[in-house]
């Protein structure tokens, strides 16, 4: 009896403003991935001019960008993004998330790619 295929899970987490996830190619099969990117920032007590931004690049091409005012003084705020991408057979993929801030401080930047079977 053949065993059920296990979905691939690739993940990276950083306290730096840049996180990179490299998914290697797979011979003879295309794969579909759900990509989730999360940014969490610490917000100053006076967030009057504070903001945070998140940019997602796939293989060097900008996929998504958003910048918002930071809220929740003295606590945390964040941005999340989700997309689904098809990776052709024998192709690798480089996912890069870049956080930008003013006033707020990056506490966590995560990228997760979960294969859809």
Image (tube, rainbow, N blue to C red):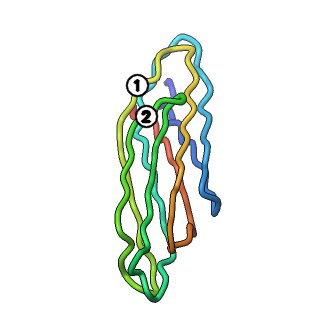
Residue in the image at 41% along x and 81% along y: 47
Looking at the image, is 102 positioned above or below residue 86? below
Residue situated in front as seen by the camera: 52 or 57 = 52
Residue in the image at 54% along x and 42% along y: 9
Crowding near the residue tagged with mark 1, few <14, some 14–19, many ≥20 C-alpha atoms within 10 Å: few
Residue in the image at 57% along x and 42% along y: 10
| Residue 58 image position (x, y, % from top left) | 49, 32
Give me the C-alpha separation between circle 1 and circle 2: 6 Å
Looking at the image, is 82 positioned above or below residue 109? above
Q: Are marks 1 and 2 in contact (CB under 8 Å)?
A: yes
Residue picked out by circle 2:
33
Mark 1, secondary structure of its residue: strand
Image position of 60 (left or right of 15): left
Q: Quadrant of residue 50?
A: bottom left
Residue situated in front as seen by the camera: 117 or 84 = 84
Q: Quadrant of the C terminus?
A: top left
- Farthest residue in the top direction? 28
Looking at the image, is 111 positioned above or below residue 63? below
How many dots with numbers? 2
Mark 2, secondary structure of its residue: strand
Residue situated in front as seen by the camera: 24 or 79 = 79
Crowding near the residue tagged with mark 2, few <14, some 14–19, many ≥20 C-alpha atoms within 10 Å: many
Q: Quadrant of residue 26?
A: top right
Nearer the N terminus, badge 1 or badge 2?
2
| Residue 55 image position (x, y, % from top left) | 46, 47
- Residue 86: which numbered mark, if any? 1
| Residue 100 image position (x, y, % from top left) | 51, 58
- Residue 57: which numbered mark, if any? none
Residue in the image at 38% along x and 42% along y: 64
């Amino acid at each position: 009896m053949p065993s059920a295929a296990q979905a691939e899970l690739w993940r990276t987490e950083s306290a730096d403003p840049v996180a990179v996830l490299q998914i290697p190619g797979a011979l003879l099969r295309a794969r579909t991935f759900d990509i989730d990117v999360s940014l969490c920032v610490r917000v100053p007590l006076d967030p009057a001019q504070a903001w945070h931004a998140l940019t997602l690049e796939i293989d060097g091409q900008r996929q998504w960008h958003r910048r918002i005012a930071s809220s929740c003084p003295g606590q945390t705020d964040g941005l999340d993004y989700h997309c689904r991408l098809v990776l052709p057979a024998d192709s690798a993929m480089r996912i890069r998330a870049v956080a930008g801030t003013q006033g707020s401080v990056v506490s966590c930047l995560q990228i997760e790619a979960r294969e859809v079977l």
